[in-house]
Structure formats: C-alpha cells, structure tokens
Amino acid sequence: MLRSATSIAANIAEGHGRFSPAAYRNHLSIARGSACETDSWLDLLKRGGYLDAETEGRLHSKCDSLVAILTAKIRQLDEIERKRKGKAVRQEPEEYLVE
C-alpha cells in the first residue's frame, strides 16, 4: 500500500515536469491507477481486520476524491492537446491544496 500511495504523488510530480500535455497526461493516468490500487489495498486491509470500517470509509472517500481530481485534470489536458495538436507546452505551476 505504501508503494502505491507514494507512487501517486511521484507520478504527478514527474508528469508536471514534462514539456508536453501528452506526457503529463500519461503520468496523471498512472497516478490515477495508483490511487485505485491504494483504494483496493484499503479494502483488503479492512477485510483482513487490520483496518476498521470507519477509517477505511474515510480513506476510501479521499481516494475517490483524488481519482475524480485526476480524471478532471486528464480531461483538461486532453482538451489542451486537441487545441494545440501536440505542440510542446509547459503548464504554469499551480498551487497544491493540502487539507
């Protein structure tokens, strides 16, 4: 679970450092997959008795929110790529929201 969870942030950061929306999008897609994997591990931990239902539910909700955010960003990059037809672009840095 630690590997899949840390892979999320690592892929977002690596993708953000790329110079094309397509490469950034690909890394966001990998990060999205890692978020889904992390959610699966949460379910397995709950079923194995290592995590109570309340904690699993709270963390599951956070994973769902993260998947939704990544999906929205992937779609935004798809639109940018369609408009620019594959030209290299560097997106301006955005602030990361931390709870």
Image (cartoon, grey):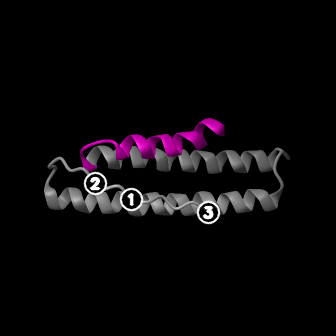
Q: Is residue 16 magenta?
A: yes
Foreground: 36 or 84? 84
Report the residue marked by disc 1. 94
Packing grade of label 1 (10 A; few <14, some 14-19, many >=20) is few
Q: What amino acid type should be assigned to the residue bearing mark 3? A: Glu
Q: For the view shown, which residue lies furthest in the top direction?
A: 3
Residue 39 in the image: above or below residue 61: above
Q: CA distance from mark 2 to mark 1?
A: 9 Å
> Which quadrant is the N terminus positioned in?
top right
Is residue 6 shown above or below 92?
above
- At x 51%, y 58%, the residue is 67
Of the residues shown, which amino acid type is indicated by label 1?
A: Glu
Instruction: Report if the CB atoms under discs 2 and 1 are less than 8 Å apart.
Output: yes
Q: Quadrant of residue 81?
A: bottom left
Mark 2 element type: loop
Q: Main secondary structure of the magenta part?
A: helix
Residue that carries the numbered disc 2 in the rendered image: 91
As drawn, the label of residue 26 is none
Residue 57: where, in percent of width, then height?
A: 73, 61
The disc label shown at residue 99, or none: 3
- Label 1 element class: loop
Numbered range of the magenta stretch:
1-21
